[in-house]
Amino acid sequence: MRSLTWGALFVLSLMWSTETIGKELSPREIYEQASPAVVMVMGYADGGRKGSGGTGSIIQSDGMILTNAHVVIEEQTGKPFPRLSVFLKPARVTGESRTDLSRMVRAKVVAYSQPLDLALLKLDGMTERLPVVEVSESGRARIGDRVLAIGHPEQGGLWTLTTGVISAEVDNFNGVKGKHVFQTETGLNRGNSGGPLLDGEGRMIGVNTAIARVASDGLPITSISFSLKSNVAAQWLREQRLGVRAGEGMPLPSGQMQRAADQQTVLSVQPQGNVVQPPQSDLSSKPMTKPDVAQPVPGRPYNLDQLISDRAKAEADLDSMMSEMRGQMKGR
């Protein structure tokens, strides 16, 4: 039997969700159902001196993850970060990053679209079946419907749950054709990038992608955040024609290809013309400080910039150790 493409699987999930409308769940029930399939994503570049962090959703049990492109694409090069680490949720989040981020898995970018701000990742070497976020038909959602988000907002806690409603709908967001989004006042901040926007049944109807925090005159903006509709993500995945066979690698579609820094192959969809992003719209965190510069200890559960900086330093130390080992082996 011929395998289904990723897009077809995603669409079938949408159809199934539409036909099985159930009762609304409590925020606690939604969190317990969806949070195990939410991950933290970190990317590193430039010898560990730069990095990015955000959130992702497991949408296939063999380790396929949907997130934002800006979480995994290095801004300076326009290519995927050389190293990507994905952290699976622990049984209980304690606020201690050493234990909360102990389940780390390497990942690679399979495909990405910068105009839509979407990326598809594949976890390396997964043998266990992972929990998944169920996907719903975003066309069912209406202004005023209750929604929830799970992610890693800076200065907050890992796997944080926030609640709110759909405030508005915006077609062709930021001038990008086909980029249809929900506006929501659900609490989103840097670190929520790529995480799921969930409906009252705990199913994903959007991918959290942007926030507005400062107006052109410098006045603060509150409760204005944006989430790409799940139907847009489904259409994009369908267009990639990425087939998945159990136990096999993922074949890539024909078309424009580019080589990433670690020699993985990705499909890159570049924007048409210059797309101007709104100020303060990036939900990820991209610290530019050197990892060996001491940071103040925050009086909060965790500091996203510090986490990325510490992880980037660990990656740089690992690279240095590997280079030293290779040098010693050559000298023998």
Image (cartoon, grey):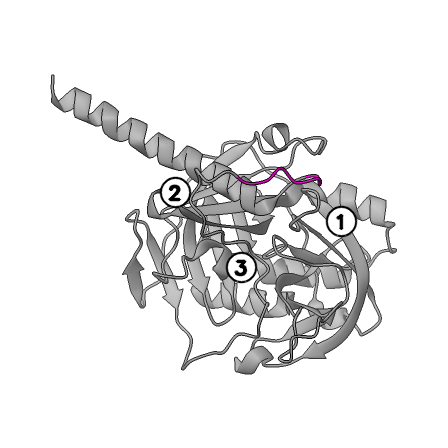
Decide: marks 3, 2 in contact (CB < 8 A)? no
What's the residue at 70%, 71% (across, down)?
A: 182
Q: Which mark is residue 161?
A: 1
**Residue 329, quarter of the rendered image:** top left
Count of marks, rendered view: 3
**Can residue 155 be seen here?**
yes
Magenta segment: 295-301
Label 3 vs 2, first from the N-terminus: 2
Q: Amino acid at mark 2?
A: Gly
Q: Amino acid at mark 3?
A: Asn
Q: Residues within 10 Å of mark 2 (few under 14, many from 20)?
A: many
What's the residue at 47%, 78% (across, down)?
A: 275
Q: Which mark is residue 246?
A: none
Q: Nearer the viewer, residue 324 or 298?
A: 298
Quarter of the picture holding the C terminus = top left
**Can residue 242 be seen here?**
no
Label 1 vs 2, first from the N-terminus: 2
Residue hosting label 2: 48
